[in-house]
Image (tube, rainbow, N blue to C red):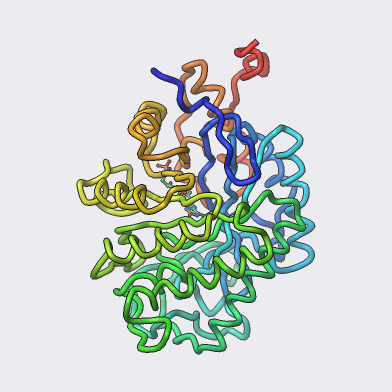
Amino acid sequence: MSDLLFSSIQVGRMSLASRIVMAPLTRSRAGAGNVPTGINVEYYRQRAGAALIITEATQISQQGQGYAWTPGIYSDAQVEGWRPIAKAVHEKGGHIFMQLWHVGRVSHPSFQPGGGLPVAPTAMPVEGKTFIVDADGNGTWADLLVPQELTLDGIKAIIADYATAAVNALAAGMDGIEIHAANGYLIDQFINSASNHRRDAYGGPVAHRARLLLEIVDAVIAVAGEDRVGVRLTPLGRFMGMGDDTPEETFDYIATALDRRKIAYLHAVEPTTFGVETDMPITPEGEAMMRLIRKRFSGTIIVAGGYDQRKAEQALADGRADMVAFGKLFISNPDLPVRFSVGAALNEADRATFFGGGAHGYTDYPSLPSSVTLEAIAG
Ligand SMILES: Cc1cc2nc3c(=O)[nH]c(=O)nc-3n(C[C@H](O)[C@H](O)[C@H](O)COP(=O)(O)O)c2cc1C
């Protein structure tokens, strides 16, 4: 197998030793007040061998939360909670971007300030569930409700929250910000025509539906610099009721607009048959979409979605991507890059412990003995 995965690359301000990215992974293990704790520090420390870690999705505000026990970056305590995570990753030579998240309609009144309805581009019914905390403090699934339509002032406030969250993430020591515009959450709800029926400047033609994304990108660039901003997209995604009438036009427009802004990277969850949650192979429409994005966006492209080492080498060799993000493989293999480099067997991920709980299925996946390190192999 060729070893393009282990070639170096410059991304924004970062000189990275490999092309291996840890994908953003919600694990629902934050402490009280949605503050990261010591166990979260240990989890990220173990995975710092990735060239770049993208944190689990982190809410920019109370309104932006949609699932139990996910971390935030809007209170002082949360900033203090994230600080040792960034430090631990840097001490091991790694880099870390924070994924900023607003879930939009994928929430529940129990998370909302004042117990109100979640917000969305359009007040329409949506099929889906979110994970809430019941009266006994246990997690339980709840149906999504018809959300309330965002006002123009409400949209302005959210853009301001993104900028503040980016300032906070940098204050906590993050190397940059990934804007989560994928997987059916707020920004994606604006992008897709299925979930956006507005008739104002934020709905209708593609330029209107992409406006929220681009205003958020510009607000975050203003505080972080374009070379510390990445954007994650799911073109052709179906998760959480997504769907678009003119996906080529939509993502052509978005990739071109992001290219103009010279952001550090564009991160695409590759379109598969069913969307983000499966390991299905990429479809012909998906391939065409990725070619279009490659044509329009001249910066670094990260791909994700069902990759193993062989497929990743292929994507780099084809020129489809510059870096590859691994999700489930990083959950169960904290030392994934070392395992790739020596061809070691991989631990299987336990789906039962993906969300919520403690150390089990989180920080107790075994690494290879410490004598097997990338330095030892190189030396
Ligand atoms: C447990 C779990 C949590 C996830 N959380 C997030 C998240 O917080 N943000 C995000 O953009 N994607 C999230 N994803 C999607 C992954 O980043 C990735 O795109 C997906 O798992 C496909 O990659 P893989 O096949 O390498 O796992 C999550 C996936 C899993 C399995």
Q: Residue at x 64, y 52 (%)?
A: 176
Residue 25 versus residue 154 in the image, above or below = above
Residue plotted at (52% across, 34% down): 20
* Residue 95 placement: quadrant: top right
Could you tell whether 263 is left or right of 372 in the image? left
In the rendered image, the residue lying farthest to the left is 284
Q: Is residue 186 above or below residue 8?
A: below
Looking at the image, can residue 133 be seen? no
Q: Is residue 316 visible?
A: yes
Q: Where does the image place residue 83, in percent across and percent down from the top left?
A: 77, 51
Horizontal side of residue 142 vs 70, given as left or right: left
Based on the displayed image, in which of its 4 quarters is residue 77 positioned? bottom right
Q: Nearer the viewer, residue 224 or 30?
A: 224
Q: Residue furthest front?
A: 260
User: 40 or 96: which is nearer to us?
Assistant: 96
| Number of numbered discs | 0
Please indicate whether residue 185 sits to the left or right of residue 251 in the image.
right
Give how far across and how far down residue 81 sits, in percent.
Answer: 76, 55
Residue at 32 percent of width and 59 percent of height: 237
Picture quarter with the N terminus: top left
Left or right relative to 4: residue 337: right
Quadrant where the C terminus lies?
A: top right
Residue lying farthest to the top in this orientation: 379
Measured as percent of width and height from the top left, residue 182 is found at 43, 60
Residue 28's image quarter?
bottom right
Q: Position of residue 159 (x, y in %)?
A: 58, 75
